[in-house]
Image: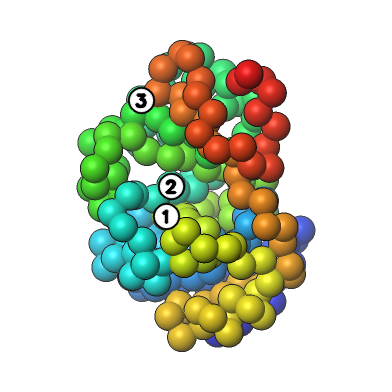
Amino acid sequence: MLLEINKYNPEYPKIKQAVDVLKAGGVIVYPTDTIYGFGADIFNKDAIDRVYKIKKKGVQGFSFIIPDLKDISKFAIVSDFAYKTMRKLLPGPYTFVLRATKYVPKELIPEKKTVAIRIPDNKVCLELVRLLSGPIVTTSVNISGEHFFSDPLDIEKTFGEQVDLVLDAGALSNEPSSVIDLTSDTPVIIRRGKGDVSLFE
């Protein structure tokens, strides 16, 4: 199902509809500040398994979206350096890799003891996680290793039968977030994307 939503001022009934889908164990597609993402409730194993199948993705884990840094210590071990760095750049087009706490479901970190955190500069994302009152698993809308989908109509055509809802905020860029490893106080650039990484060079 394709549902148009205002990316600047997302309509509450549409946000609630998407959150109801997530709470029921569904999988949605939604816009971020970079590319479209598949989304599922972080604590719903069946929904996470569905995303793995849709992506045709090996056991590598996913990142997830939180609304702000207030509750990050539940999910990640954060040094003072890492916290100050993230506070400067978030919300924004970055994914930060940190050491995970035991609170993070094993389905998200099957082989590693790290977790990838996102706080996108996108009102749709932030309203979703605030209303859900918990993180959303996120991963790019594509088959693993293939091109990203940026047009909601193409997404609906390709993945519409495999997901429960597509939030259409118009076409987005094909540039993913920059990924930075902050597991130590020496940052490591894992992927150069939309976010400026000159701070880490």
The N terminus is located in which quarter? bottom right
Tag 3 near tag 2, CB within 8 Å: no
In the picture, residue 116 is in which quadrant?
top left
Type of residue at label 3? Answer: Ile
Q: Choose the circle earlier in sequence order: 3 or 1.
A: 3
User: What sort of colour scheme is used for the picture?
Assistant: rainbow
Measure the C-alpha gap from mark 2 to mark 1. Answer: 6 Å
Marks 3/1 in contact by CB < 8 Å: the verdict is: no
Quadrant location, the C terminus: top right
Which residue is rendered at x = 24% and y = 43% of the image? 111
Task: Give the answer, above or below, for where 54 lies relative to 33.
Answer: below
Mark 2: amino acid: Ser
Badge 1 marks a residue whose secondary structure is: strand
Instruction: Locate residue 44, reporting x and y percent.
Output: 29, 62
Q: Nearer the viewer, residue 63 or 22?
A: 63
Q: Image check: 41 left or right of 127?
A: left
Q: Which residue is mark 3?
A: 77
The residue at the point 65 percent across, 74 percent down is 152
Specify the amino acid type for callout 1. Val
Residue lying furthest front in this view?
A: 146
Q: Which mark is residue 137?
A: 1
Mark 2 surroundings within 10 Å by alpha-carbon count, few (fewer than 14), some (14 through 19), many (20 or more): many
> Residue 125, relative to residue 119: is it above or below?
below
Q: Report the residue marked by disc 2.
A: 63
For the residues marked 3 and 1, what is the alpha-carbon distance in whole angstroms?
Answer: 19 Å
Tell me where residue 18 appears, x and y as whole percent: 52, 71
Q: Is label 3 in a helix, a strand or a loop?
A: strand
In the image, is residue 138 above or below residue 28? above
